[in-house]
Each structure stands twice: as structure tokens, then as C-alpha cells.
Image: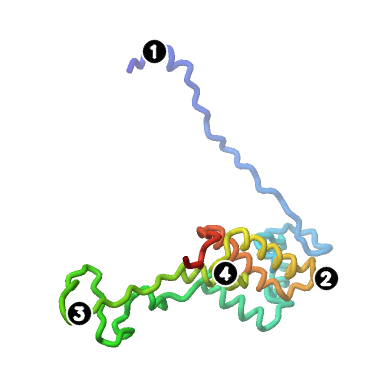
Amino acid sequence: MNLNSRLFDSIRVKRASKEQVAPAQTRCAHPGCTKLGEFRAPMGRDREGQFFCFCLEHVREYNATYNYFNGMSDDAVAQYQKEALVGHRPTWNMGVNRAGKGHREDTDGTEAADPLGMFKGRPGFQHAPAPKRPQHSEATMKALAVLDLDEGADLAAVKARYKELVKRLHPDANGGDRSSEDKLREIIRAYNFLKTVKLTANAGKTS
């Protein structure tokens, strides 16, 4: 590298600005207050991520009366708290697929599993019949059940049922009644899950 090159004379390095831009000054959101709103307070349910800006006095007053669950029934609050344990994501029980595991206690003792065929043809040995594998995973079956569909439903049927249920349960279709919101959220989660699963028109049918 030639440090005496004229190219180095044309290089300009932008100096860091020593001046810091002052943050925007926001007035306290409390009616009639002229102080700066230096403290944020959540706006409440269904407005997550949105905040009021209050002065210290009024943010304390607001927090003292704030109730996220205001207007929710006891059952709705209990359901919300249960879903909060898993981050409001759909969950399904694990370890209950006995048909796919070949438990020894499921046979009468005269049959045994022989996946490697080591005892094939030996007298007195009887192969256990291969368990019938389910058409879909347990998670898929539960998501279909939420939409009241059987395992033979394809993606077109899922979309049609989803639209039907959303129109039926949406608050706008019920005069603003929000009592079915939890069920609606469950339906939306099930539908989003089923969109990622390969469903065919022949699923669940046997030849």
C-alpha cells in the first residue's frame, strides 16, 4: 500500500456529531395537566403496544386503578391466565399415541413385535400385526376438531369452515358482543396451524 498516494488526500471521514438530538417533549395525557409526560402507561387490553404518557403524579394515579381484565368474565380471565402459561400458543398433550409405539401390554403374550425380522419363520413365533398408523398427527386432529371437521377434510374445506365460523363469532356480526373472542382466537390458531399441514382430499379414506 502506497501511503503517499494522492488518493488518500481525497478521503474524508465524517466526524461524529457531538450534539445529541433532544427527545421529543410530550405533554402529560391527563386532562388539564401541563407537565411533561415522562412516564409511559399501557392503554389496556386490545391495545397492546400502545401507551399513554403521564407525569409522575398522574402515572401513579393511573397505575393505581389500572385493570387489564376489566370487563372480562371470570371464565374468560381463567382461560387467559391458562393460555398465558404457554405464551398464548396452541398446545397438545404428548405421549398418548399408543397405536404408534407398540406397547407390550397391548398384546396377549402370543404375539411380539419383530421389526428386524430376526425370528421370521421360526416355529411358535407369531408376528404382531403392524399397528394402524393414524392419517394425521394428534396436533392436526385437534386443530380439525376445533373447526368441527373430521380427518377427511382438505384445505378447501378448512378454509370454508374457517370463514363460516369467523363470520358467525366476530363481534361485528353480534352487535359488538365480545363474549366469543376466546373461541374465535382458538379457531384462528387452529386455522393458521392447518395451513402449514399437508391436507389432501383423500385424507382419512381407505381403499
The residue labelled by disc 1 is 5
Mark with earlier residue (4, 2): 4
For discs 4 and 2, the disc positioned in front in the rendered view? 4
Q: Distance between the residues labelled 2 and 1?
A: 77 Å
Comparing labels 2 and 1, the label whose residue is closer to the camera: 2
Instruction: Answer with mark 3 or mark 1, whichever residue precedes in sequence.
Output: 1
Q: Looking at the image, is mark 2 or mark 1 earlier in the sequence? A: 1
Mark 3 Cα-neighbour bin, 10 Å: few <14, some 14–19, many ≥20: few
Between the residue at mark 4 and the residue at mark 1, the CA separation in whole angstroms equals 72 Å
* Mark positioned earlier in the residue sequence (4 or 1): 1
Kind of residue sitting beneath label 3:
Phe
Label disc, if present, on residue 125 of the rendered structure: 3
Q: Where is residue 177 in the image (x, y as percent from the top left)?
A: 78, 73
Q: Nearer the viewer, residue 185 or 199?
A: 199
Q: Extreme left residue here?
A: 122
Of badges 4 and 1, nearer the viewer stands 4
Q: Would you identify the image quadrant in which residue 189 lies?
A: bottom right
Q: Residue furthest bottom?
A: 108
The residue indicated by pointer 2 is 175
For numbered disc 4, what is the local secondary structure?
A: helix
The residue pinned by badge 4 equals 144
- Residue 172: where, in percent of width, then height? 79, 66
Q: Distance between the residues labelled 4 and 2?
A: 28 Å
Kind of element beneath mark 2? loop
| Residue 96: image location, x then y, percent | 42, 78
The part of the image, by quadrant, that contains residue 62 is bottom right
The three-letter amino acid code for the residue at tag 4 is: Leu
SS label for mark 3: loop
